[in-house]
Image: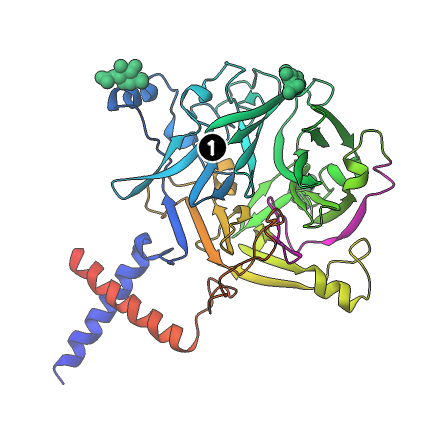
Amino acid sequence: MYHLPLFMLLVTMSLVAVHGQSTTVCTDSRIMHRFVTIDYEWPNRTAKDSAIANEEYIVNNNIISGMKVYDGNVYVTVPRWRRGVPSTLNKIVASNGESILQAFPSWEMQKIGDCRALQYVQSMEIDPNTGWMWIIDTGRINFFAADGTTTQNLCPAKIIVYDIKNMVEVTRYVFPNEVADRQITFLNDIVIQYVNDESRYAYISDALAFRMVVYDRLLNTSHYFSHPASMEPESGNGNITILGETLPVSAGINGMALSKDMQYVYYGPVSGLSLYQVPTSVASQPGGNFAGSVRKVGNKPSQAAGMAYSKNDNLYFPALGENAIYRWDIKLDMTLQNTDISNVEMNALTRVLQDDQCMVFVDILNFNNDGSLWFSVNKLNKFLLTSIDFTGSSGANVLIWKVPIGETGYLDRRAATTVPPVTDDGINGASTTSGQGLVAFTFLTFAMSLVLTRRS
Ligand SMILES: *[C@@H]1O[C@H](CO)[C@@H](O)[C@H](O)[C@H]1NC(C)=O
Ligand SMILES: *[C@@H]1O[C@H](CO)[C@@H](O)[C@H](O)[C@H]1NC(C)=O
Ligand SMILES: *[C@@H]1O[C@H](CO)[C@@H](O)[C@H](O)[C@H]1NC(C)=O
């Protein structure tokens, strides 16, 4: 009987410790990388110190946004929304057990003001068949400054196709001002279309000029479409409220996806709920009847930035207001509605993952050829509202998740896909705890709390 009070005391203390410690959250084994702040692999300590001294590196202005996975490596972008971002395109590497960023393809390619180098990269696409990375560079920096400093329209926007396997540039193209206006462009997201077994067209969202920009790699040309009804911010739907904090966003066409049959481009404004579809037969050619070919397929449950289309015709996208990821099962809806992809409406939605602590602002999603869904989480709402906590006492700010989901992406062109079977928790919610899981969770919490109690 003497043991009981001691035991209860331990439990009470441990509960206090658990709730007071951010180290106990986001320990899911599917989280591959965690960052409180973003640091880089510098040539040497002097280089880092001088970058901090001359404000080429302002630690708290760096946040990861774009993310793509290829051959076991994770490539990420750090958008130059604000000053002090030393490298805008990177690969995650490990250093003393911490995840840090290595400038990709090199430090030389990150030089601000050198128009041969990268100025501002939000997104890139990686073709899993060739290992070519399609990099979009807006050319402008500091356009979401929080310190009153002015935007710098340094270079024209460009696209670079880079062969990761051989570390050589395949081609590059500079967008003419008529297509990507040097004063306002913001190249945001990109998808690639194959034609006759060759990657050919890139469809790119311009979130501030409200355009869809199209690049034809074979002809080395570009054109754009403007369609205000589907590309401008949706009136009344620009407030993104996450856990009671509201971020007013006034940006247009943002996330892009392409159907695996390469027949349709999907897009929608980040300030909005609508999802639209347009045939690639129209969008790939200049001068087509874009307005007459756009179709709204439905409303998302909440706003979202990125999207990812799978080889099985499922479309995955975040619901920012719910800290969740949804899947639209397009084939199921075609069956239920007895119709085809050009008429089907978005109804069959499943919330596949949800977590109020570890999925705050799911930004970019993509598949790896091994059947896993990867996504970046970055508390971007708090970063933009400058309410983000970089001290570490609120836990990690950027998380990179890898969830086995049994699907590969729209670009996977292998004939017979060899995808590992879905694991038990692959599809279910990050927050789902029940039955044996709950017992295990409780035990784990208790065990960890003991460790924490001892430490403190
Ligand atoms: C540190 O790296 C910079 C940039 O590569 C180089 O110029 C400098 O010589 C290096 N300094 C030392 C002490 O190695
Ligand atoms: C493509 O066009 C660009 C203009 O942006 C030009 O500099 C480049 O040489 C062209 N590339 C090819 C392969 O013709
Ligand atoms: C946010 O909500 C307020 C109040 O309802 C409204 O006036 C404003 O236009 C909204 N902002 C956006 C960007 O939608």
Task: Specify the color scheme.
Answer: rainbow
Which of the two residues, 301 or 366, is positioned nearer the viewer here? 366
Among all residues in the image, which is located at the extreme bottom? 1
- Per the rendered image, the range of residues in magenta is 289-316
Which of the two residues, 424 or 361, is positioned nearer the viewer here? 424
> Which residue is at 75% across, 29% downward?
224
The C terminus appears in which quarter of the rendering? bottom left
For residue 203, say whether it is visible: no
Which of the two residues, 413 or 285, is positioned nearer the viewer here? 413
Residue 308 magenta-highlighted: yes
Q: In this view, does 135 lie above or below 412?
A: above
Q: In this view, does 390 lie above or below 353?
A: above
For residue 112, say whether it is visible: yes
Q: Which amino acid does label 1 sit on?
A: Val
Residue 68 magenta-highlighted: no
Helix, strand or loop: magenta stretch: loop
Q: Where is residue 47 in the image (x, y as percent from the top left)?
A: 29, 20
Q: In this view, does 73 lie above or below 302?
A: above
> Which residue is at 32% across, 59% downward?
19
Q: Where is residue 163 in the image (x, y as percent from the top left)?
A: 51, 31
Could you say whether the residue bearing mark 1 is in a helix, strand or loop? loop
Image-quarter location of ligand 1: top left
Q: In this view, does 403 lie to the left or right of 160?
A: left
Q: In this view, does 431 lie to the left or right of 272?
A: left
Residue designated by label 1: 78
